[in-house]
């Protein structure tokens, strides 16, 4: 064996996770004890009641009821997603999102949609 050849391997790694945390999600056990937690829970319960009551009617006879059912289910699903975000404390992992503003616009848009569809349904029922 005359000269054994040696080989040098150079490896490098780079990370582009500047502002993102790579740790696992936590669980906030005390979320339902806060005012926000109780309000989100009430939104889920009342939203579920609204869309099940509308789905139990003959909503296909009045077109406004179909839109109310769509809005009720859409906002209920979004509320469940927001609940999961707050329970898992994922809002801490994404600090770029202004969560207070997101909540304000979400609840404001839900209020406007429910008021508009209340007016549409009340006028549609009167016309029948």
Image (spheres, helix red, strand yellow):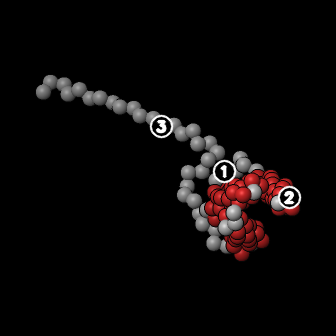
Residue at 63% x, 61% y: name it: 84
Residue for badge 1: 94
Q: Secondary structure at mark 2?
A: helix
Image coords of residue 50 (percent x, y): 73, 67
Density class for disc 2 (Cα within 10 Å; few <14, some 14-19, many ≥20) is few
Q: Position of residue 115 (x, y in %)?
A: 85, 58
Tell which circle, 2 or 1, labels the residue nearer the N-terminal end. 1
Badge 3 is on which residue?
13
Q: Tell me the SS state at disc 3.
A: loop
Task: Return the residue nearer the eye: 15 or 91.
Answer: 91
Please identify, in this view, whether the residue under mark 2 or under mark 1 is nearer the observer: 2
The answer to the question of whether label 1 and label 3 lie on touching residues, with beta carbons closer than 8 A, is: no
Query: Which of pointers 2 and 3 indicates the residue nearer the eye?
Result: 2
Q: Is residue 125 left or right of residue 6?
A: right
Q: Residues within 10 Å of mark 3 (few under 14, many from 20)?
A: few
Using the image, determine if residue 92 lies above or below residue 18.
below
- Name the residue carrying label 2: 127
């Amino acid at each position: 064996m005359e000269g054994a050849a040696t080989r040098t391997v150079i490896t490098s790694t780079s990370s582009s996770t500047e502002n993102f945390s790579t740790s696992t999600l936590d669980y906030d056990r005390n979320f339902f004890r806060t005012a926000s937690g109780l309000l989100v829970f009430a939104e889920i319960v009342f939203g579920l009641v609204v869309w099940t009551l509308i789905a139990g009617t003959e909503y296909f006879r009045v077109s406004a009821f179909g839109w109310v059912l769509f809005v009720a289910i859409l906002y209920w699903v979004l509320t469940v997603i927001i609940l999961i975000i707050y329970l898992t404390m994922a809002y801490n992992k994404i600090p770029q999102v202004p969560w207070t503003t997101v909540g304000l616009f979400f609840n404001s848009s839900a209020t406007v949609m429910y008021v508009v569809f209340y007016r549409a349904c009340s006028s549609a029922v009167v016309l029948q």
